[in-house]
């Protein structure tokens, strides 16, 4: 039998993000997933090192890597549409659940328990992944604005407000110690 799960995952690179926005630098779901996984892992490590938490940073990174995998089937629904009202959000949650079930059905039975766990983060893991996801969105918006793309001006402000108000001490630590370097020239961050 030929199982399609991993072949489908490799199609993340074909799903463009920010579909309603004019982008100076296009971003696909594969790139976003990797960046979110790196930042979620960093937040978990920060939590363990600075705040006495006991996160499994490797598990957080793995689950973040797959956090938007359902978008391979659903596409990237823009945030203003997804959260427009509770009816749309509820309907989209059902669509995401159906997509997740279909994706998991592309695995052999003996691998299913492991991957079901990957698609079911704990509440603490969800919080870190969501914080990393929001931070990635802010970095994207800020980078677009800095490159002269005014299309992202409102999104930058709204996303920063969401990042700032996020209840996550690990995220606050990251922002104070690492975020500024994302907007520096290479020479300033590599020396």
Image: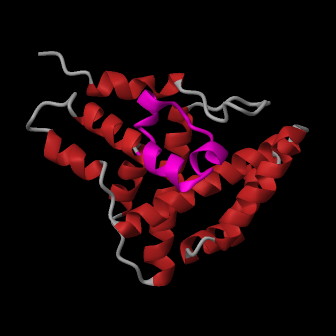
Task: Specify the quadrant that holds the N terminus.
Answer: top left
Residue under the image location 62 percent in, 50 percent down: 84
Question: Which residue is painted at 51% across and 30% down in the image?
Answer: 75
On the picture, is 78 further left or further right than 176?
left
Residue 2 percent coordinates (x, y): 17, 16
* Closest to the observer, 92 or 116: 92
Q: Where on the picture, by quarter, is residue 77?
A: top right
The colour style of the image is: secondary structure
Q: Is residue 31 visible?
A: yes
Choose between 163 and 44: the one closer to the eye: 163
Up-down relation of residue 164 to residue 62 (above or below): below
- Report if residue 188 is visible in the image: no
The furthest residue to the left: 110
| Residue sitting at the far bottom | 52
Question: What residue is at 80 percent from the left and 30 percent from the top?
Answer: 24
On screen, residue 13 above or below 39? above
Q: Is residue 101 above or below residue 178?
A: above
* Residue 26 found in image quarter: top right
- Location of residue 125 in the rendering, given as x and y in whole percent from the top left corner: 39, 63
Is residue 66 rendered magenta in the image?
no
State the residue lying farthest toward the top: 1
Where is residue 111? Give x, y as percent. Answer: 14, 38
Residue 71 magenta: yes
Please state the total of marks drawn on the protein image: 0
Q: Is residue 36 left or right of residue 175?
A: left
The image shows residue 40 at horizontal and vertical percentages of: 49, 58
Residue at 78 percent across and 45 percent down: it is 143
State the extent of the magenta-drawn residues as a range: 67-92
């Amino acid at each position: 039998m030929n199982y399609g799960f991993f072949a489908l995952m490799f199609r993340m690179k074909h799903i463009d993000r920010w579909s309603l926005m004019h982008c100076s630098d296009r971003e696909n779901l594969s790139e976003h997933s990797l960046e979110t996984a790196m930042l979620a892992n960093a937040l978990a490590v920060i939590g363990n090192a600075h705040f006495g938490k006991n996160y499994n940073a490797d598990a957080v990174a793995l689950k973040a890597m797959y956090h938007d995998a359902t978008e391979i089937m659903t596409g990237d629904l823009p945030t203003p549409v997804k959260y427009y009202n509770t009816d749309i959000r509820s309907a989209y949650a059902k669509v995401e659940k159906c997509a997740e079930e279909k994706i998991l059905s592309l695995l052999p039975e003996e691998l299913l328990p492991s991957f079901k766990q990957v698609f079911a983060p704990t509440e603490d893991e969800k919080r870190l992944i969501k914080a990393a996801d929001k931070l990635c969105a802010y970095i994207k918006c800020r980078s677009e604005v800095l490159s002269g793309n005014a299309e992202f001006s409102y999104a930058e402000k709204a996303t920063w407000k969401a990042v700032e108000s996020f209840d996550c001490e690990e995220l606050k630590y990251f922002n104070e110690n690492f975020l500024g370097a994302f907007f520096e020239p290479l020479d300033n961050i590599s020396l």
